[in-house]
Amino acid sequence: MLIVHVFIEVKPEFVDEFVDATLANASASVKEPGIARFDLLQDLDNPTHFVLNEVYRSSDAPAAHKETAHYLRWKDTVADMIVSPRTKRMFHNLFSADEEWA
Amino acid sequence: MLIVHVFIEVKPEFVDEFVDATLANASASVKEPGIARFDLLQDLDNPTHFVLNEVYRSSDAPAAHKETAHYLRWKDTVADMIVSPRTKRMFHNLFSADEEWA
């Protein structure tokens, strides 16, 4: 799997709206054939900090995701809710095995 | 779920040994009743950087994990393989729902 952690800091007054928009994007994203998981995590020590845990079945899948209507709508919707440009890290899984991520 | 991301930088000469020790710990950890997932991720841009993705079913489960023989063995084994003290962030899941993490 290709696992992408996206780090997002949200302006405090937009946290609820950001969560609503991101839940809509996540629930549509998990239906994409190239996506095994798409989780939204909220930092316990700083509730304006979020991580997207995006688990892709192939190296082509992120590009396909970025062409979907739900991603483009999310990107536009949250653009002004975010403190700074979002950052990411990319990983591969040594454990669990691929079949454990679906 | 209580999700803990543990960030670990490994000395280059110990990467293979670290992976072996951590796979042993992970495969034992996923059998703990309080643990839903326990993943080892390797950073694609810097293969000496790892993240443990630990998904606990309750706030008590991390303490129980730290008392297991496999955790204590791992902690001792990797102590001298790590560049700096490991750090962590803690999260809760807004998406996916709890039943999707097992």
Image (cartoon, coloured by chain):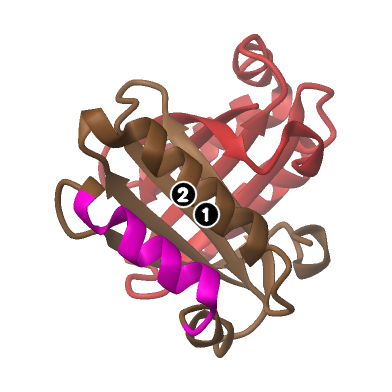
Chain colours: A brown, B red
Q: Quadrant of residue B2?
A: top right
Q: Earlier in the sequence, mark 1 or mark 2?
A: 2
- SS label for mark 2: helix
Q: Position of residue A33 (x, y in %)?
A: 74, 78
Residue A68 in magenta stretch? yes
Q: Which mark is residue A53?
A: 1
Q: Quick check: A88 left or right of A40?
A: left
Q: Nearer the viewer, residue A28 or B94?
A: A28
Give the chain letter at badge 1: A
Quadrant where the C terminus of chain A is found in the figure: bottom right
Q: Which mark is residue A21?
A: 2
Q: Does residue B10 appear anywhere in the picture?
A: no
Looking at the rendered image, the disc whose residue lies closer to the viewer, 1 or 2, is 2
Q: Position of residue B32 (x, y in %)?
A: 81, 27
Is residue A70 depicted above or below A95 in this figure? Answer: below
Q: Quick check: A30 left or right of A84?
A: right
Residue B3 in magenta stretch? no
Looking at numbered disc 1 in the image, what kind of residue is underneath it?
Asn
Residue drawn where x is 83% and y is 66% of the image = A99
Residue range highlighted in magenta: A67-80
Residue drawn where x is 20% and y is 37% of the image = A11
Quadrant where the N terminus of chain A is found in the figure: bottom right
Q: Which mark is residue B42?
A: none
Q: Quadrant of residue B64?
A: top right
How many labels, in total?
A: 2
Give the chain letter at badge 2: A
Tags 1 and 2 touching, CB below 8 Å: no
Main SS class of the magenta portion in the image: helix
Q: Nearer the viewer, residue A26 or B62?
A: A26
Residue drawn where x is 48% and y is 50% of the image = A22
